[in-house]
Amino acid sequence: MFARVLPRALLVALTLLALVTPVRAADGGYATQASYSLTLPASDLSYTTSADVFPGTVTTRIDGFALRGRFLAATGRTIYLQKNFGADLWLPVATLGPDDTMDPCFIKISPDGTKIGLGVGSYKPLFVFETSLLSVNAPPNLRAAAGVKIWDENMYDGAWRGNRYLFINAGADAGSQIYAIDTNGTTGTPIEILPDIPGASGGLAFDAAGNLVTGIGYGYGAAATGQLKIWTASSVDAALTGTGLAYTTTGKILIEGALSAASLGFDASGNLYVGGGDAFGSSGHYGYAGLVSSAAIQQVLTGGAVANPVSPADWAKIQPDPCHNDDATNVWYAPSLGMLVVTANLSSLPPTCAQFDVTRSGPAGQQFFSPDAPDTDGDGVPDGADNAYLTPNPDQKDSDGDGWGDAGDCDANDDGVINRADLSALMAAFGSATGEANFAGGYDLNHDGKIDFADFSAFKQRWGKNAVCE
Amino acid sequence: MHESRRARAVSPARRSISLWAVALTAFTFTVACDDHDDSVRAPADSGGGGTSGGATAGGAGRNTEGSAGTLVSESGAGGDSGVGGESGAAGDAGAAGEAGAGPGPGTVSNCPPGGAPLVVGNYVDAGGNQFLLRAAAKAATFALVPAGAANPAKLPRLFVINRVCSAGKALIASDESASYRLDFTQMGNQLSVCLSAPVTTLDTAVALPSADVTHAADTGCAGKPFSVYTAEAL
């Protein structure tokens, strides 16, 4: 009796388990949400623009602008701060010297948001500086500003491991290498981590546990373009203390043929995003960004099979480029916003798509959101794309184009400063409440649905300062 | 008992604002406009007391945030015009330098619902300090804005107008923390104003005697001149 019942119970249990367990998918749910366009700053002085997003834990403001979730971008000889969520407007917050230009390899913000590493190009200097140095009102010249560490480094990509070590991926004699720099130090002396990667540089990234992922950007000989490998946090710790890692004999292969293994990072669910492209190689992988599922990564870490690039459970494509002909997509992730931003070179567009858009990645981007991305005002537009994220405005109307949605615009005359014109606008709306004709949400500064003296108190705190309408 | 009296007092005041706002539409002296060029005005320390007809009205105010201060004539040490001492309410709103409260040369006003002061618009004094008066759909307000470009060290003050008194020649207003009486007189495009010292309630402000508009040029505002503003050209 028991013997007969057990298999049946087991079958029922397994069936129920199958019903309640979602099918594993690599797309992270991004494809199920609306996406929004975003244009990064560009410069004629640079081929490309690099960017990063401030962590959600950062409480720092720069001349009134909250850094949390905001983009920092570098191109030309300028570093820019995104004016508002979803805005294509960029405020200079630092510059290089008048003789400097950059084709930025990377601009990377430390996990606690206090430090920035800027690699301005291959065999050009690495700048390491405090976030507090940035200024909207008086952008510092990083060449001349006190406290900026400027080291000559060889570099392709960079990633912070904690708030002290900046890991850098760079070319080497027979391929590429990874080394670390102690940014608390004064010399920038490289600490060897992976000296013998048998191919051109890919990207590099750390997951939440400190595991390192890197790979081969372009294969030499038997080395495969787009191979990604993962090393445990403990092995990376050991390398930092002097025990360098050998590429071919340590770590585990995560996936093969993942574009050019560039522009790597992890989202909040532990999925690994991948950019780049292999238009010049034989794989045919280009024109999109990719996502390796966290489940596939865990599978590899626990001794399971390598992720399968043709399995939707392991690998998903993210395609912002309608021509699918870009060779160098870039990807950035904002954890606090559940937002993945993919940029692509869109130098050709339908219906006249070129065979390849092969120049470096352009500034045209698309914002993708996870299903749990925050939408603070509940208007259906996730915070990361919302030009008035505290005030419902599903139409996102921004009549004056100042980056603040009409529903939350506190800069009546668009001069960027809170002054008499704004006081006049506040007076015109004084006493009104949400839904009334003269209500102006931008002056409901405490977001309680009415404009009164509490808002005027907040207004006075901003008087004469930058118009930051949030 | 006290609360119910206050509740009754508020109701007609609200009605008066509504009627007043309608009347203003017909009698607007100058049309409110936004300032698109704050920066062109020469900076001035508006916290240093008011001006009247271009003459400095008195010593430095005690307002630590540099409030406009120019709308009011300062009471100085108090008592010199028999209007009582300083308010003693100096602080955030820059109440220092305002006319002293208490019995004075004027008479207690009637503040019925309705009436219009006919002065909605933007005004500026000789030092560049501004007086803005608005009648919007939900509230009538006036503001004192220090001269020069907006400066965090010199904050504007905002008042909600609660009642219109003396056939439109005085206002009862309140800010975040106190109530006031504002007397004014108009000649051509010039507006002379006198703001009382702060008092604790609207009823107290209503009970304040009027400033002496017949001596607006010298001692009518608690022993000091009224502050003189000129309507801004549009």
Image: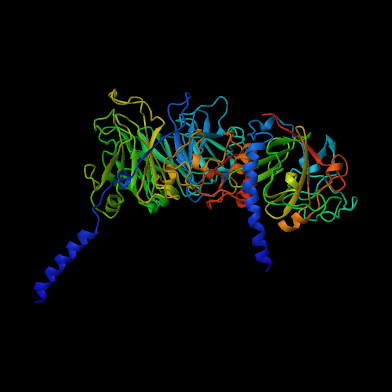
Instruction: Give the farthest residue toward the bottom.
Output: A1
Q: Is residue B35 visible?
A: yes
> Is residue A334 positioned above or below A136 on the image?
below
Q: Count of labels shown?
A: 0
- Judging depth in this view, the residue of A265 and A119 nearest the camera is A265
Q: Residue furthest right?
A: B80
Q: Nearer the viewer, residue A171 or A381?
A: A381
The answer to whether A8 is drawn above or below residue A302 in the figure is: below
The quarter of the rendered structure image containing the C terminus of chain B is top right
Q: Quadrant of residue B33?
A: top right
Residue B1 image position (x, y, % from top left): 67, 69
Kindly tell me whether residue B200 is visible in this rendering.
no
Q: Position of residue B89 (x, y in %)?
A: 77, 55
Identity of the residue drawn at 38% across and 44% down: A265
Taking B19 as reference, is A163 left or right? left
In this picture the colour scheme is rainbow
Residue B33 as seen in the image, left or right of residue B92: left
In front: A403, or B166? B166
Task: Name the one closer to the observer, B58 or B100.
Answer: B100
Q: Residue A281 appears at what percent x and percent y? A: 27, 30
Q: Position of residue B83 (x, y in %)?
A: 86, 53
